Amino acid sequence: MSLLQEDFEEHAEKAKTLPESTSNENKLILYGLYKQATVGDVNTSRPGILSMRERAKWDAWKAVEGKSKEEAMSDYITKVKQLLEEAAAASS
């Protein structure tokens, strides 16, 4: 397993510790990057208008379409670090 893959999995675990106050926008960014890193480009059709939550998640994933798995992993790690730092600053 590559160092990037290990770092990515470590930060995926850390992401679970983000505070409830993390914005939906940031959660969606993480979701999209995670899916791009683990699955690749969007492989499903867009959910219907009544499935607002699923549709937002699909849109977040679609927004990072075309990124390589490595690039998506790297961006995900950077975003988790940023959010953890913000959470730590807010609680101190």
Image: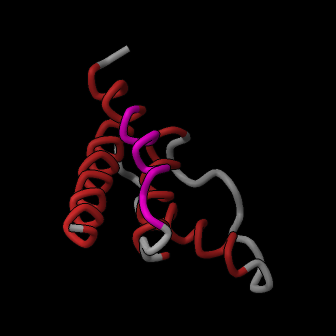
Residue 17 drawn above or below residue 28: above
| Residue extending furthest toward the top | 1
Compare residues 89 and 6 and report the one nearer the observer.
89
Residue 75 drawn above or below residue 12: below
Q: Is residue 15 magenta?
A: yes
Compare residues 4 and 67 and report the one nearer the observer.
4
Q: Is residue 79 magenta?
A: no
According to the image, what is the colour scheme of the structure? secondary structure
Q: Quadrant of residue 10?
A: top left
Quarter of the picture holding the C terminus: bottom left
Left or right: 12 in relation to 42: left
Left or right: 80 in relation to 29: left
Q: Which residue shows up at 44% across the image and 74% down it?
A: 21
| Residue extending furthest toward the bottom | 49
Please provide percent x and percent y for residue 5.
36, 27
Q: How many marks?
A: 0
Please provide percent x and percent y for residue 14.
40, 44
Q: Quadrant of residue 9?
A: top left
**Which region of the structure is painted magenta?**
10-19
Quarter of the picture holding the N terminus: top left
Left or right: 7 in relation to 33: left
| Residue extending furthest toward the front | 92
Compare residues 81 and 51 and report the one nearer the observer.
81
Please provide percent x and percent y for residue 40.
50, 43
Q: Which residue shows up at 42% across the image and 65% down it?
A: 29
Q: Main secondary structure of the magenta part?
A: helix
